[in-house]
Image (spheres, rainbow, N blue to C red):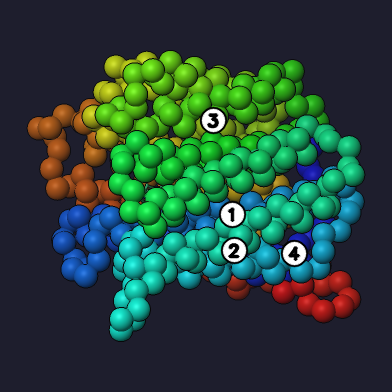
Amino acid sequence: MPTRSNPQPLLSERILWAGSLFGFLIAGFTGALYRWKLLSGSPEILSPTHIRHAHSHLMFFSWVIPALFLLIKAEVERITRKAWPSWTNWVIFATVLLGFLTYPPFLLHGYGPASFGTLRLPLAPIFSSWNILAWYLFIALYLRVTWTVTRSLSLRLLDLAMFFLVLSSLGAWGRLVLVRLQVQDPFWTSLMVHTFLVLFTDGWLIFALLALLIADLPTPGPTVRWGTWMLAVGLPFSVLLSLPHTVLPQALLIPAAVGGALVAIGVALMAWPAWASATPWRVPLAFLLVKAVMELGYTIPPVARWALYNGFRIPYLHILLLGFGTLGIFTAVQRRWGVAWSPGLPALRVGILILLLALIPLTGIWPKTLGGRWTQVLALWSDLLVVAIALWIWARIVVSPSPIRSEPPGPPAL
Ligand code: HEM
């Protein structure tokens, strides 16, 4: 794979990269806190559900979003040779900051309101909606910079990533509306949550990272366009596949299965050619292919019920979000800006593999006779291992004098 010649990042971009990595650190630590809570019951004031919400929202808001925005901005600048407005980095900074603002209210109150005397304010939903408005601002800037540019395959994939980010946000708005209207119908609440989750992970994250990967390849490979179509068409239907079977009407079973199969095969067709030519990407791609195989299994109702019953949801999500998503972001940063910006990647790969393997004894396929408290303890330690590696990487990025470009003249970009 040829090496790329990219300009070194600006100081403001280094601050943003360190900031989003800090989001990963705190969110990862919160995941470990969830395991600690299950083991010890403490801290008593926090509910496990709220801890989980704080973890997943911080991962999305302050890690995946700003890190990918930063990479997309750099990639679009490289492809189009057009500069973004100087305040774009402030928008990315806002996503990191607003992500952190959602964290305490999610941790303490979940989606519910916080009380200030007689005033009751749903702070987590409020800050989440501001965060989504910052996404829209970035998408508007993306459209402005790329509007007149001829679409390469990578740019088309980025267009789709932005489209699915907007579509997924409709699920988040819908969820807020249902909370406001106090609607508790399980079909509609699940539909909104899963519209957000599936379109964010399988739509925004996969399209954005594959766009960055394909930009790295000399030729994308013949099957990528087919895969792109299948993924884009199948995605909205695959949301149904992720709904609990108890709430999914019989009539929607077939569209759900077809959608899931299109997504699984589409992802494989997009990822497979890259496997041959993109060596540094192989580890994240391997996780993406495992996710595709699992999703194909979910299209068969008895298999899906078996997987749900045996607790495969969390491993499935983390194979995609940690194995592919997080390692993909680190790989893309290393390919663009060099090892100094993404040090310790081999250690992170090993740590993440251990974390994912440690989830197996928590599933129903693990023999009951071999189970027990140690399985939770192992999961806790493997979570802490990844957090420790991420802390070391973060410290290296913050303290090491890795090369940076000087900021352009004018007011500071950040
Ligand atoms: C250091 C890395 C990570 C650790 C230690 C970790 C830990 C955890 C734990 C303990 C849970 C709850 C498991 C359960 O319910 O049994 C969880 C759930 C979840 N995590 Fe992670 N995770 C990590 C990375 C990520 C990343 C990178 C993302 C997304 C970008 C993510 C998104 C989620 C989501 C969406 C859930 C489900 C939340 C829910 O059902 O409410 N996690 N994670």
Pointer 1 with pointer 2, Cβ within 8 A:
yes
User: What numbered label is drawn on residue 65?
Assistant: 1
Amino acid bearing label 3: Pro
From the viewer's perspective, is the residue at label 3 or at label 4 nearer? 3
Between the C-alphas of marks 2 and 4, the distance is 11 Å
Q: Earlier in the sequence, mark 3 or mark 2?
A: 2
Q: Which element type, helix, strand or loop, lies under badge 3?
A: helix
Amino acid bearing label 4: Thr
Which residue is at the front of the view, 285 or 185?
185
Q: What residue is pinned by disc 4?
A: 88
| Rendered residue at 47%/48% (across/down) | 174
Between the C-alphas of marks 1 and 2, the distance is 7 Å
Amino acid bearing label 2: Thr
Question: Residue 339 placed where, x, y %?
Answer: 66, 54
Amino acid bearing label 1: Ile
| Rendered residue at 55%/48% (across/down) | 169
Q: What residue is pinned by disc 2?
A: 95
Q: Earlier in the sequence, mark 3 or mark 4?
A: 4
- Is 175 drawn above or below residue 8 in the view shown? above
